[in-house]
Image (cartoon, grey):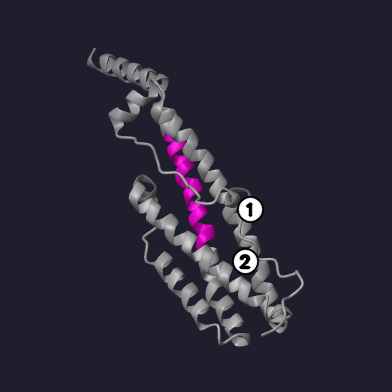
Amino acid sequence: MHKRLTALILLLATVLLGGCGYNTLQTTDEQTKSAWAEVLNQYKRRADLIPNLVKTVEGFAAQEKEVFLGVTRARASVGSIQATPELINDPAAFAKFQAAQRELSTSLGRLMLVAENYPQLKSDANFRDLQAQLEGTENRITVARNRYIKSVQEFNITVRQFPSNLTAMLFGYKTKPQFTVDDEKAIAEPPKVDFGAKPAPAK
């Protein structure tokens, strides 16, 4: 009798939890974690490219010290942040991470502008290979961020909608922070690293 009662309670709990969004919360939470892991993977790929990129550019434009220092400092700032899976549950830490990545993107943009003034650099095989890798990585970052945005949107809707919001409160689920941009143009236009344009006169 006791076993039957226990089984009945478990069955009832399963039905209730399934109908109040618990399973959806589990699924969307895992999807968000997976999407976030891919975002981190692509950002790490970019960070790993930077030392060789800076070294190559420096070989042709050693006088651009401030630009190199800016990129190096921005990369160090990104590396100092512990980008753990828990970061997506902490809005303040997420904002700090995003700000550091934005500064790194800005610094890389300055580095790319430097290259425009050095035709010999642009024709260097090693530099062109690094440029192609960086361009591909920027595109992957955009795709990964978009997937994360969509997965967080789905999760946050589940957390806020009735009756799943009651389940979310019961089990401590809260909305996750989302990516934002200061310049709306950046949403549709990721950082450009195209060196096929006509170079500016060398200094």
**160 left or right of 58?**
left
Given residues 88 and 188, the one toward you in this image is: 188
Image coords of residue 161 (percent x, y): 41, 24
- In the image, what residue occupies the spot 62% across and 71% down? 112
Image coords of residue 154 (percent x, y): 49, 33
Please state the total of marks drawn on the protein image. Answer: 2
Residue at disc 2, secondary structure: helix
Image coords of residue 15 (percent x, y): 39, 18
Residue holding disc 2: 134
Residue at disc 1, secondary structure: loop
Rendered-image quadrant of the N terminus: top left
Q: Which residues are magenta?
A: 26-44
User: How many residues crowd mark 2 within 10 Å: few (<14), some (14–19), many (20+)?
Assistant: many
Indicate which disc, 1 or 2, sits on the residue closer to the N terminus. Answer: 2
Residue 130 vertical position relative to residue 149 in the rendered view, above or below: below
| Three-letter code, disc 2 | Leu
User: What is the chief secondary structure element of the magenta stretch?
Assistant: helix
Residue holding disc 1: 189
Q: Is residue 128 magenta?
A: no
Given residues 86 and 128, the one toward you in this image is: 128
| Three-letter code, disc 1 | Glu
> Label 1, label 2: how many angstroms apart (C-alpha)?
15 Å
Furthest residue toward left: 2
Q: Is residue 115 visible?
A: yes
